[in-house]
Image (cartoon, rainbow, N blue to C red):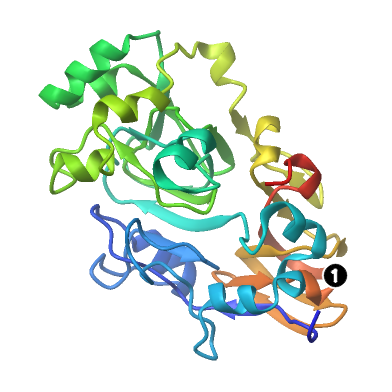
Amino acid sequence: MSRPLSPIRLAANQPPQFYRGGDAIAELRTGQRSSASSFGPEDWVASTTTLFGQDTNGLTRLPDGTWLRDAVRADPEGWLGAKHVEVFGESTGLLVKLLDAGQRLPVHFHPTDEFAREHFDSHFGKTEAWIVVGTYGDDPRVHAGFAETVSKTTVSEWVRDQDAPAMLGALNSTPVSAGDTVYIPAGLPHAIGEGVFVVELQQPTDFSLTLEWRDFLDSPEKGHLGVGFDTALRTLDTSGWDAERLGSIIRHTAGTEGSTVDLLAEDSAGFFRADQLRPAPALALDPSFAVLVVLGGSGTLRTEHGGEHGLTRGETLVVPYGAGEAELTGDVTVIRCRPPAPEKRSPR
């Protein structure tokens, strides 16, 4: 490592999106509601990822004006640790978002690693997970996986006709509340409903294949990202997800006690990790690249090489590996997001 690194408090980073939302992000960060015109529906936290096809939109800028992406590239082992770099190179391997769905999102899905390598020249596809941190409105819910197996011919017809009721109606529809988490493997069709506010973890890409593009996107090309829907559907999971299978990706953690709560389904560990931290009264943390989202209360983060940092509700921080071992204290609730442990993935 070239020099000791410290945790860094981050400002909001909200690239333009095609859907409404953002009041819940504003309330978390500032304590006040705000219009979607000033707070967009997605806040990309500690992002080294750009919007699809763009040069810098989506990237996080550090307080000194440097892009986080460039800072990591300049000192990858300091930011990420030698074992991480051996497996993932200079990529953080992670994108974290605050996402506030002010309207229902379209039915869409994401490519697998294999599909992304073949069609987008990327090591990463886009597996993701949602940690529900708040809901509002009459009927907050999420939609994930086809309830019954459908043929790709049928899906292709829905896409051709833009039959939104058929697409949405074929998905499992599940009411959610704060503390629920949903793991979305690459290929699984899904949509987040209106009034759902999540911390989202995902692989560090912006590959969304949007079946329901009309009324959301400008053109079908933006729905299939230039590969054509016939090709895109090859990576779509059209199998049926019954209640038992759906239970393998949805967890209910609101009542779970403990200073550290593993939030996500077991199968997600090969893509990212997320824990709820509530020190009682102190909690030791191993060195790791991490993104912290402070959901409530106030506390202090002390790091071996990076000093002492006060934490209050609504703040987000990026913690470099080089900050060393850490201690979290106070009456505070923090979501700690991390890439997968290097041993969970094979070297590139």
- Percent from the top left, x then y, of residue 202? 53, 48
Q: Along the horizontal axis of the image, is 254 left or right of 259?
A: left
- Percent from the top left, x then y, of residue 243? 53, 13
Q: Along the horizontal axis of the image, is 185 left or right of 312?
A: left
- Percent from the top left, x then y, of residue 252? 62, 33
- List the residue tagged with mark 1: 327
- Percent from the top left, x then y, of residue 171? 36, 20
Q: Along the horizontal axis of the image, is 44 left or right of 151?
A: right
Quadrant in the picture for residue 92: bottom right
Please report the residue visible at 51 percent of the width from the left and 66 percent of the height from the top.
Answer: 47
* 73 lies above or below 190: below
Quadrant location, the N terminus: bottom right
Count how many numbered circles sit on residues in the image: 1
Please report the residue visible at 42 percent of the width from the left and 37 percent of the height from the top.
Answer: 110
Quadrant in the picture for residue 268: top right
At mark 1, the secondary structure is strand
> Is residue 136 visible from the viewing direction of this image?
yes
Please report the residue visible at 70 percent of the width from the left and 39 percent of the height from the top.
Answer: 269
* Residue at far bottom of view: 64
Q: Residues within 10 Å of mark 1 (few under 14, many from 20)?
A: some
* 17 lies above or below 234: below
- Nearer to the camera, 163 or 296: 163
Quadrant in the picture for residue 245: top right
* 62 lies above or below 258: below
Please report the residue visible at 28 percent of the width from the left and 73 percent of the height from the top.
Answer: 38
The residue type indicated by label 1 comes to: Glu
> Is residue 163 visible from the viewing direction of this image?
no
